[in-house]
Image: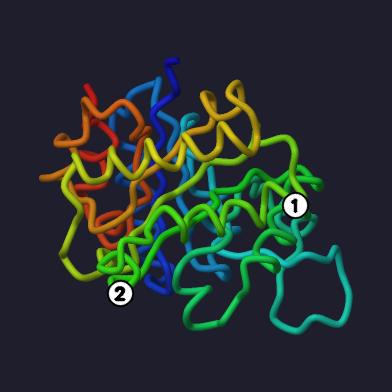
Amino acid sequence: MARQFFVGGNFKMNGTKESLTSIIDNLNKAELPSNVEVVIAPPAPYLGLAVTENKQKTVAISAQNVFNKASGAYTGEISPTQLKDLGVHWTLTGHSERRTIIKESDEFIAEKTKFALDNGVSVILCIGETLEERKSGVTLEVTARQLDAVSKIVSDWTNIVIAYEPVWAIGTGLAATSEDAQETHKGIRDHLVKTIGAEQAAKVRILYGGSVNGKNAPDFKDKADVDGFLVGGASLKPEFVDIIKSRL
């Protein structure tokens, strides 16, 4: 099944009004492929700026985090209704930095994912294993556990994009080979067949996220189950455009 190529850019806690405006201006000036879906996730204070500055029809704006309530006494949190009010229709959930630093559980991530979806916000659901888990050979057990928390409470995966991010390859310069990524992505899709059904599993896009850059992105071009990338540091650089064009 042909799945639309998807490139996400997670800016993390980086950027200023000036630098982020420059990044978006660079995207605006680029001749981006019309058949590639692009989503960029700036830090929360700049979401409104990104919505205003973005002029590319194929580029959408995403939050990096969302809460599982619509409003209330939840200091520092952002609701999906507030995101939509800004014109933001995507959010990340489950990023490894939220899982490891903020100690978010699989169940809490699943709740946030469901609440975002229920309120009309699409989700890039991040999963992945640590170096220790990879060395122990439990990669697919870890990703299955993370996915199962969501599939227990979410039946419709139409508006979910999965980002497989090996924790050991984020910001380290290390990257899984395209063959390793394909093997893991196929294992993830095979697991989804068992939990959400073959039809949905065939449609859901699975991104690779682990030190992807303009140089290595083309290596993944012919991998059947690698449907795009979630890019970290390289999304802050001009080479992000090269990644978006890597399947031309």
Instruction: Give the image location of residue 87, x and y in percent.
Output: 67, 47
Q: Which residue occupies the foreground of this view, 98 or 72?
A: 98
In the displayed structure, does residue 112 sit left or right of residue 242? right
Quadrant (top left, top right, bottom left, bottom right) of the N terminus: top left
The residue at the point 68 percent across, 47 percent down is 151
Can you tell which quarter of the image residue 200 is in? top right
Q: CA distance from mark 1 to mark 2?
A: 30 Å
Can you tell which quarter of the image residue 120 is in? top right
Mark seen at residue 114: 1
Amino acid type assigned to the residue bearing label 1 in the image: Lys
Q: Which tag, 1 or 2, sits closer to the chain's start?
A: 1
Q: Which residue occupies the foreground of this view, 9 or 108?
A: 108
Instruction: Give the image location of residue 223, x and y in percent.
Output: 25, 29
The residue at the point 72 percent across, 35 percent down is 156
Q: Residue furthest top?
A: 1
Residue beneath label 2, please?
132
Between tags 1 and 2, which lies in front?
2
Colour pattern: rainbow
The residue at the point 80 percent across, 81 percent down is 74
